[in-house]
Image (spheres, coloured by chain):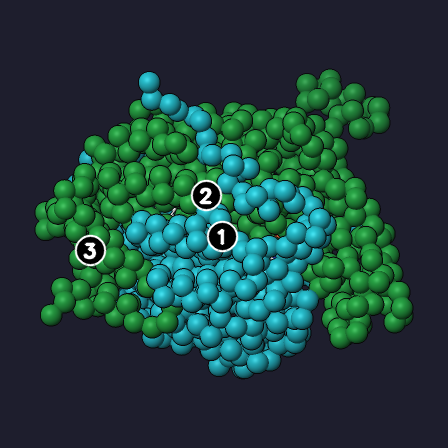
Amino acid sequence: MVKTDFGPPKYDTMLHPIIKRNYGKWKYHEVIRPGVIKRVAESGDVIYVVRFGTPRLLSIYTIRELCDIADKYSDGYLRWTSRNNVEFFLTDEKKIDALIKEVKKRVGFPCGGTWDAVTGKYGLSNIVHTQGWVHCHTPAIDASGIVKSIMDELYEYFVDHKLPAMCRISLACCANMCGAVHASDIAIVGIHRTPPLPDDDMVRRTCEIPSTVAACPTGALKPDMKAKTIKVDVEKCMYCGNCYTMCPGMPLFDPENDGAAILVGGKISDARRPPELSKVVVPWVPNEPPRWPTLVKYIKQILEAWASNARKHERLIEWIDRIGWERFFEITGLEFTEHLIDDYRITPYFYGELRTSVQFRW
Amino acid sequence: MSETPLVDELEKGPWPSFVKEIKKTAENMEKRAAQGMDIKLPKTARALLKQLEISYKDKKTHWKHGGIVSVVGYGGGVIGRYSDLGDKIPEIEHFHTMRINMPTGWFYTTKALRGLCDVWEKWGSGLTNMHGSTGDIIFLGTRSEYLQPCFEDLGNLEIPFDLGGSGSAIRTPSACMGPALCEFACYDTLDLCYELTMTFQNELHRPMYPYKFKFKCSGCPNDCVAAKARADFAIIGNWKDEIKVDQEAVKEYAKWMDIENEVVKLCPTKAISWNGRELKIDAKNCVHCMHCINKMPKALKPGDERGATILIGGKAPFVEGAVIGWVMIPFIEIKKPYEEIKEIATRTLEWWDEEGKFRERLAELIWRKGVREYLKVIGKDVDVRIVKAPRNNPFMFFKKEELRPSPYIEELKKRGMF
Ligand code: HEM
Ligand code: HEM
Ligand code: SF4
Ligand code: SF4
Ligand code: SF4
Ligand code: SF4
């Protein structure tokens, strides 16, 4: 009999004994240096959580090496974070340096990705990203290659606490935005810029025409019943690719015109200011594999303009709010173009009055 | 001369390289297969590199639309993927990914991980994502015929692993590390997340809904799993009473911290005052933003009346626009066995299943049907906390029972309009 529906291993079987013993009874934490968080329990127990950046795409042979390291340093326990970092749990502070050295030597992962709100010194965490050319069928850009190129350039911010506030960078390789980059301080989103070019034969063979037509948010598609295919009103299409998701006969890839948009100013935590969606500040950057120099330059330009001008604890949107968008474009050197004015008339102002924050009074 | 000069560029630089990971996998798989180990796909990692090189040259993807593939008894958990270069690089013709439900909070023993690696070495490419953006362990790339034996081997491990969700199903729920490591957790995120995962196993493995549905659990308003922006059902830890203040610890911070500028002035509602000896928080004005607690974790703690705020409908822009979840339940107690929250989740799912159109997320359904109707479905009263402000137009709907009797109403009734 094949077992089904048994679910994941129960979390409490995966916890380090110190974590299990002090579950729900942590007293405080201290970031003692970039990448190392000391957690102190009410019982007086102490655990050092040591964080390392990973490329997310991991070899099983690397995972086995991480296991060897965890067996040696953290009693056979380890954990991943929500941003693709890996963490080890140490009980002996004196072993931290050796751990960092060994991880660096065996798998090449840097220690860092933390921030210290207490002193107001922040590091950059890892970039969350999607599949890109490594696995998906709809991307307008690659994911892993761009992330690697950006993180190489921003490496110093990961391994140190040099930023004035938290900064979350995320990447999605198409407008589907797996991973929800739409509320990040800096977001990179793959966009197409050409309408689909129907492959009539493929449409006939593989698509349900009415549901494909209905999937277009702008009403740009019409069934052509006689020819049993789909017609595109190119004036209405905003290249979202939703029709291609529905029907393989509606490809819209143009290597010369696909590329990335850059958005800024989103946030998710409620700290100081409620969550907010990111806004487009660069409409399009071309695909420039293998290292995407133009895109990387823009990201660095934005990050560093913010980092050198923001006050302590001021996230990107908080900084922009203080100085104004006029000044944002001036300081970053980005150009404000007509594309940045919202003319997507379909956007419903989804219940503008509903509260999208846990900030309220009792 | 390397076959893959473009992607080789991505081996350089200080940040860990995914290209090195692919090459390392290829070398080890080839070597171990040559030594006689039972490895079904020793050449797939190398083939991926070749296809990637072509994508880097062509500036486009070479993956085709996935067909429907799964394992016996399930409808999801696998993303089917085929290459359009299958004739040139046959080793990569099929490259399906399997989504494996991670242990809640992404905590592992090395034994559990080694089990996963052994299975994937035998049946797959040896490549993984730790983790996919929903949270699952992603096994990246195998052939259709190996899905079933791989799944069975996973289930037979000493620490067995099951598939996660995909398609129009409940997706693998995820949680922040909460009480396992964080002193801010206002409820047990790991336990609730695990319980929800187990309660909805059927709905997770067998796509049956209009579209996808995500639960995410964060222990406090910091929201470390970004639930507010990307979960249809976000459970965010919160508290109702006063922040607990340890004045001695505040004084310790005061020795070096600029409390006036970094804490008092940054409180969004100016609820804090500090006179150099005592920190006072006006509980009636505190909006639980976490800033002061983040600043002084040794001195400040969320209050004792703890629970969660439920935000409904968070999603990316597809199709009708991005939504940050709407507060539908300002406060709910989260206590084992979690009956109330499970009841609300079940009613929500049943309503959406019944009323939702194909590819309509919960937010879009609520938008179409109205918040009032959703509140009725979950049996909750309106609360001023679900809005930022009251509406700014007078186009309200009134029910018949709300109207006063009048000759006009009689006339409406007489004409059959009421
Ligand atoms: C005790 C443990 C933790 C504490 C005290 C903590 C603290 C915080 C704080 C202070 C914020 C809000 C920052 C701000 O907006 O100023 C935050 C947000 C966040 N944290 Fe944590 N965190 C913890 C664990 C983690 C871990 C392990 C991760 C994963 C790497 C993580 C990922 C995040 C993310 C993604 C956000 C949302 C940021 C946003 O987009 O607004 N946190 N956390
Ligand atoms: C209309 C919207 C969306 C569509 C049509 C869509 C479609 C897809 C497709 C086709 C894949 C397969 C990629 C592969 O080949 O591995 C994928 C992967 C994935 N999607 Fe989505 N997606 C959408 C939105 C989202 C959102 C909003 C999230 C999360 C908040 C998400 C989370 C994921 C995750 C976790 C993966 C696994 C791969 C990864 O981690 O990169 N998706 N999605
Ligand atoms: S963001 Fe788009 S291209 Fe990227 S993995 Fe998701 S669906 Fe695929
Ligand atoms: S790409 Fe999007 S907007 Fe254009 S036709 Fe397809 S569904 Fe419509
Ligand atoms: S969401 Fe809150 S409780 Fe959970 S890990 Fe983050 S700071 Fe801690
Ligand atoms: S939690 Fe936020 S709103 Fe409440 S007192 Fe602290 S800073 Fe002010």
Residue located at (61% from left, 72% from top): A121
Note whether B137 is above or below B250 in the view shown. Answer: above
Question: Which is in the foreground here, disc 1 or disc 2?
Answer: 1
Within the image, what quadrant is residue B180 found in? top right
Provide the secondary structure element on which disc 1 rests.
loop
Report if the beta carbon of the residue with label 1 is closer than 8 angstroms to ligand 1.
no
What's the CA distance linking mark 3 and mark 2? Answer: 26 Å
Q: Which residue is mark 3?
A: B27
Chain for numbered disc 3: B
Tell me the colour chain B is drawn in: green
Provide the secondary structure element on which disc 2 rests.
strand
Q: Residues within 10 Å of mark 1 (few under 14, many from 20)?
A: many
Residue located at (51% from left, 62% from top): A95
Q: Looking at the picture, which amino acid does disc 2 mark? A: Thr
Q: Which mark is residue A74?
A: 1
Viewer-proximal residue, B150 or B58? B150
Provide the secondary structure element on which disc 3 rests.
helix
CB-based contact (under 8 Å), mark 3 and mark 2: no
Q: Are marks 3 and 1 on the same chain?
A: no
Q: Looking at the picture, which amino acid does disc 3 mark? A: Glu
Tell me the colour chain A is drawn in: cyan
Q: Which residue is mark 2?
A: B109
Tell me where residue A276 appears, x and y as whole percent: 60, 58
What's the CA distance linking mark 1 and mark 2? Answer: 10 Å
**Does residue B373 appear in the picture of this structure?**
no
Viewer-proximal residue, B185 or B320? B185
Q: Residues within 10 Å of mark 3 (few under 14, many from 20)?
A: some
Q: Looking at the picture, which amino acid does disc 1 mark? A: Ser
